[in-house]
Amino acid sequence: MSHRIAVLPGDGIGREVTPEAVRVLRAVGKGSGTTFDFEEGLVGGGAIDATGAPLPPATLALCLKADAILFGAVGGPKWDDLPQEQRPERGLLGLRKQLDLYANLRPAKCFPFLVDASPLKREVVDGTDLVVIRELTGGLYYGEPRGVERAADGSARAVNTMVYSTAEIERVARVAFDVARKRRKRLASVDKANVLVVSQLWRETVTRVGKEFPDVTLEHVLVDNCAMALVQRPTHFDTLVTENTFGDILSDEAAILAGSMGMLPSASIGSLAGAGGSLAGAGGGRVGLYEPVHGTAPDIAGKGIANPIASVLSAAMLLRYSVNMSADADRIERAVERVLAAGHRTGDIARSGEKALGTRQMGDLIVREVEAQY
Ligand code: IPM
Ligand code: MG
């Protein structure tokens, strides 16, 4: 078998962690007899510098013909003063829209070895294992009308629109129920139905889709309450589904539960993925995008000390959801667990006094643990 993987490291530590995930995939390829064809593309700030655009046409074309995309991170202080429409982030937002990557899966699991790395108390985070499913191509991020009107007197009025259709809600709800069904069969749908009409439609639609999944217990949680519950009793949650902006915020919050953002992978799945848009898990889909939840981390970029685990675990998700190699995804996850269990740490997850490894060293250890399983 052969799979085409578009590799878009982007900016900052994206350039440092992504190569480690590629090395891990190469080890999987060798062990399993699979050929991965990696082709690198420019995106974000680096693409702006080289071509003037955050998502050059060549990169989009590369992604469209790939089986999956391994993404790093985009952005950085250098491009902070550019107008909205020209910022590095537009590269990522453009890809999500162009590839219709409407379901974003962000697991947050508290690794037992890292309970003490979380700023929250051990008894609160211990046992946390949840996944946030964030709608990724609608809501405030893309809704029309949008824009700023400036008046002659210097005053201005700016508009973003939160808009969702039933079809958009239904498809992400189906993914969420499907994921919940393979987990502990509990789904929390997060909205602001006490205030927003969009949320009322959200709630109504999710409830209706839920009838197709009678084995999954559905609850509705208001977003403000959910933000509180996530840090108060995170073990209550299994699978959460919510609209784009709420999901952006809650998934960052959930990241804290895992001890470090440097541990968290994500998958963005499109309508082309899997059978009938459902997350087959065993299905083998088309063009999903896999990226660490962390950003470019300008404060540590270029130092070779970033934690590559989020990127490596994103590669595992890629194997599971885009190319139907679940057993190999398990091998990667096991390798990461073994390296951590043996006490190896990067700076973000090391306790004071503990030795911190560099990006490359951590990558070496994981590659070795992957190789050992074939
Ligand atoms: C994320 C990020 C992006 C978002 C930015 C970089 C555009 O915060 O993936 O959560 O807001 O979606
Ligand atoms: Mg975010």
Image (cartoon, rainbow, N blue to C red):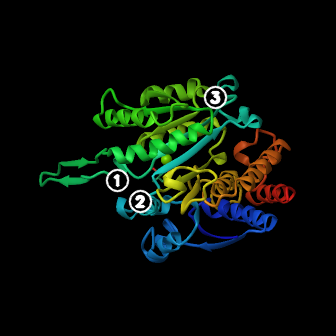
- Say what amino acid the circle numbered 3 marks: Leu
- Nearer the viewer's eye, disc 1 or disc 3? 1
Mark 2–mark 1 Cα distance, whole angstroms, equals 9 Å
Q: Which residue sits at x=59%, y=24%?
A: 233
Left or right position of 65 against 328: left
Coordinates of residue 224 in the picture (x, y in percent): 43, 28
Location of residue 43 with respect to 96 vertically, above or below? below
Q: Is residue 248 visible?
A: no
Quadrant in which the N terminus is drawn = bottom right
Q: Which of pointers 3 and 2 lies earlier in the amino acid sequence?
A: 2
Quadrant in which the C terminus is drawn = bottom right
Q: Are the residues tagged 2 and 1 within 8 Å (C-beta)? A: yes
Q: Which residue sits at x=43%, y=37%?
A: 209
Mark 3–mark 2 Cα distance, whole angstroms, equals 35 Å
Structural crowding at the residue carrying mark 1, measured as other residues with C-alpha within 10 Å and reported as few (<14), some (14–19) or many (≥20): some
Q: Which of pointers 1 and 3 lies earlier in the amino acid sequence?
A: 3
Tag shown at residue 330: none
Q: Mark 2 points at which residue?
A: 97
Location of residue 338 with respect to 7 vertically, above or below? above
- Say what amino acid the circle numbered 1 marks: Tyr
Coordinates of residue 198 in the picture (x, y in percent): 31, 38
Tag shown at residue 142: 1
Location of residue 351 with respect to 60 vertically, above or below? above
Q: Quadrant of residue 373?
A: bottom right
Q: Name the residue under label 3.
A: 120
